[in-house]
């Protein structure tokens, strides 16, 4: 999240805690919403066995103070839930960079994903378990507050919302905890990419159902939440796929060796013809000694041919531009980043002497993303 907020002046269990700007905006709103429904809550709680007389809670500022206490308690509960994740992640040797409270709850940002069989599922499930425990402890402590209707209302409200929070987070939709548990369990007997793909599919379906439910129940916070889950789940799936596919891969592992190269003396007409059977933007140019001298773009060659009137001997030499190079031992992920930023479509892999070892293009990167558990993609299979 790009927008920052306010960092608490103290860390909790060694984890920095940030209050996002969206959280700071929504806290008074929550306090207001809860405060304006104090009577309703009192009636509701009386029906589930917590007898509260609302008449004493409706005077003056009381509803708003109770609303504020409940809203603060709600976010404190979310904070403890996130700390539950952070402490469990630490058991797996994973540091938590920060915990951030924002308007849809809390997020614990880990330095990396916990590794090991089932680790992600364990770290995820501890959050809802923490919420259930908080809810249970609060419910259990209610008799202590028997004499104060205000305290009783706030405590029982928090007990129930913690239980609901736990149930909601157990929905099998990434990036909710339930989605992580689902993926972690699938990973016990499926490859990582396949498990992620299934989890993302289930997440999408859950998000759509949630959104529809929120729409028909006129609960628009739920609709916003569903949108968030849908998008974040998808993004998380893509990130996981990328991360898994690129992990530990070097440029030398994925490059295409023996690419088509041209020499500076090649006539431009012949060079342009290359484009008619190969879909590349351009080609690496090598000198007689096999050293890379640059990159010639087909578009530049076409422009040069159109501009040249009667010059019969136009050659590639006239259109050589700089090549984007990368070292063979560079990270494959670095190649992806460079390709995304550059505009040549391919990176030239050169050794320390400037010798061309291969090229890395989109196709080489896409090949990495192919799930090894699946048969090769149909595009090739369909060719005679
Ligand atoms: Zn959680």
Image (tube, rainbow, N blue to C red):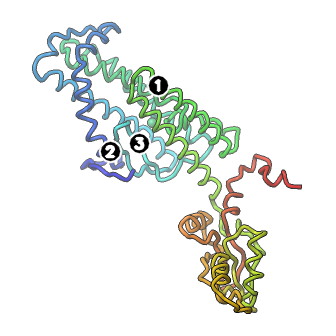
Q: Quadrant of the C terminus?
A: bottom right
- Tag 3's secondary structure? strand
Furthest-right residue in this view = 384
- Tag 1's secondary structure? helix
Image coordinates of residue 376 in percent, x first then y, are 79, 51
Residue drawn 34% across the image and 32% down it? 77
Q: Which mark is residue 12?
A: 2
Q: Which residue is at the front of the view, 353 or 73?
A: 353
Image coordinates of residue 146 in percent, x first then y, are 23, 12
Q: Which mark is residue 167?
A: 1
Residue 354 lies, with reference to residue 137, above or below; the image says below
Residue drawn 68% across the image and 58% down it? 366
Q: Earlier in the sequence, mark 2 or mark 1?
A: 2
Q: Which residue is mark 3?
A: 107
> Is residue 19 among what the camera can see?
no
Image coordinates of residue 15 in percent, x first then y, are 36, 48
Please tell me in which quarter of the rendered image ligand 1 is found: top left
Question: CA separation, marks 2 and 1?
Answer: 25 Å
Question: CA separation, marks 2 and 3?
Answer: 14 Å
Image coordinates of residue 6 in percent, x first then y, are 26, 49
């Amino acid at each position: 999240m790009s927008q920052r907020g306010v960092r608490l002046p103290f860390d909790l269990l060694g984890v920095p805690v940030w209050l996002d700007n969206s959280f700071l905006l929504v806290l008074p709103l929550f306090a207001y919403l809860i405060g304006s429904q104090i009577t309703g809550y009192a009636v509701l709680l009386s029906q589930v066995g917590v007898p509260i007389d609302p008449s004493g809670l409706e005077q003056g500022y009381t509803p708003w103070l109770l609303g504020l206490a409940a809203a603060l308690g709600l976010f404190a509960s979310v904070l403890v839930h996130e700390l539950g994740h952070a402490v469990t992640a630490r058991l797996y040797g994973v540091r938590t960079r920060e915990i951030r409270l924002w308007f849809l709850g809390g997020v614990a940002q880990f330095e990396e994903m916990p590794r090991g069989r089932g680790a992600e599922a364990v770290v995820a499930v501890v959050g809802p378990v923490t919420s259930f425990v908080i809810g249970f402890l609060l419910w259990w402590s209610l008799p202590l507050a028997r004499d104060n209707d205000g305290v009783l209302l706030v405590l029982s409200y928090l007990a129930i919302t913690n239980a609901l929070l736990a149930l909601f987070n157990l929905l099998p939709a990434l990036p909710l905890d339930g989605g992580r548990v689902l993926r972690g369990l699938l990973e016990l007997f499926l490859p990582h990419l396949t498990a992620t793909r299934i989890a993302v599919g289930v997440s999408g379906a859950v998000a759509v159902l949630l959104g529809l439910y929120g729409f028909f129940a006129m609960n628009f916070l739920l609709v916003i939440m569903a949108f968030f889950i849908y998008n974040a789940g998808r993004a998380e799936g893509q990130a996981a796929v990328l991360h898994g596919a690129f992990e530990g891969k070097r440029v030398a592992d994925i490059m295409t060796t023996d690419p088509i190269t041209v020499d500076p003396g090649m006539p431009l007409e012949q060079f342009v013809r290359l484009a008619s059977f190969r879909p590349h933007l351009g080609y690496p140019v090598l000198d007689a000694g096999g050293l890379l001298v640059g990159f010639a773009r087909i578009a530049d060659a076409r422009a040069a041919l159109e501009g040249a009137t009667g010059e019969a001997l136009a050659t590639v030499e006239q259109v050589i531009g700089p090549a984007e190079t990368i070292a063979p031992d560079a990270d494959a992920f670095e190649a992806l980043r460079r390709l995304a930023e550059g505009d040549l479509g391919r990176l030239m892999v050169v050794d320390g002497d400037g010798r061309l070892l291969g090229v890395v293009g989109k196709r080489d990167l896409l090949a990495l993303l192919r799930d090894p558990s699946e048969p090769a993609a149909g595009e090739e299979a369909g060719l005679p």
